[in-house]
Image (tube, rainbow, N blue to C red):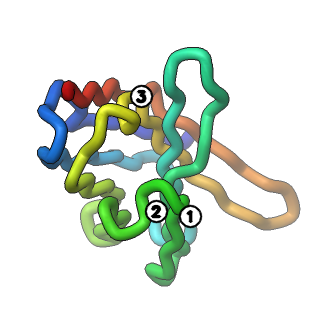
Amino acid sequence: QVQLVESGGGLVQAGGSLRLSCAFSGSTFDVYRMFWYREAPGSQRELVAAATSDGRTNYADSVQGRFTISRDNANEVAYLQMNSLKPEDTAVYYCKAELQGPYLRTYWGQGTQVTVSS
């Protein structure tokens, strides 16, 4: 069974940086696509960034140029480097792993809180 454990959230001032980590276990990491989502109070969960198994990435317009998703296949960890943080980036950030095959397999982490003060 795949397990995902996020870490690295916290409180930071606007303009600051944080790096989130998502530790993967229970299967073969490098075949999974990895995603970061976020959910702010009163809002729907939204996609922030994605990385394919071969390292291709894409980003939400709101974070393009400020956030970077990466993956360390050897150590089975996905990262989200967040720079130039804004108060509107405040949310719970979730990691997701997805594998397409005969059926879609999707796994979520428990989330980590990011709070950006103005």
- Of label 1 and label 3, which has the lower sequence position? 1
Task: Please give left or right for residue 118 compared with residue 28 in the image.
Answer: left
Give how far apart the Cα atoms at labels 2 and 3 are. Answer: 26 Å
* Kind of element beneath mark 3: strand
Task: Please give left or right for residue 13 compared with residue 111 in the image.
Answer: left
Evaluate whether residue 5 shows in this view: no
Q: Please, what is the three-letter code of the amino acid marked with disc 2? A: Phe
Q: Quadrant of the N terminus?
A: top right
Name the residue: 79% across, 54% down.
104
Q: Nearer the viewer, mark 2 or mark 3?
A: 3
Evaluate whether residue 17 shows in this view: yes
Q: Residue furthest front?
A: 118
Q: Nearer the viewer, mark 1 or mark 3?
A: 3
Circle 1/circle 2 CB separation < 8 Å: yes
- Of label 2 and label 3, which has the lower sequence position? 2
* Mark number displayed over residue 91: 3
Please name the residue that numbered disc 2 is placed on. Answer: 29
* Kind of element beneath mark 1: loop
The image position of residue 77, as x and y in percent, is: 31, 56
Q: Is residue 82 above or below residue 87?
A: below
**Neighbourhood count class around disc 1 (C-alpha, 10 Å): few under 14, some 14–19, many 20 upward:** some
Quarter of image, res 42 = top right
Judging depth in this view, the residue of 56 and 64 nearest the camera is 64
Q: Is residue 72 above or below residue 48?
A: below
Q: Please, what is the three-letter code of the amino acid marked with disc 1? A: Tyr
* Mark number displayed over residue 32: 1
* Mark number displayed over residue 94: none
Quarter of image, res 89 = top left
Judging depth in this view, the residue of 18 and 26 nearest the camera is 18
Give how far apart the Cα atoms at labels 1 and 2 are. Answer: 6 Å
* Kind of element beneath mark 2: helix
Quarter of image, res 33 = bottom right
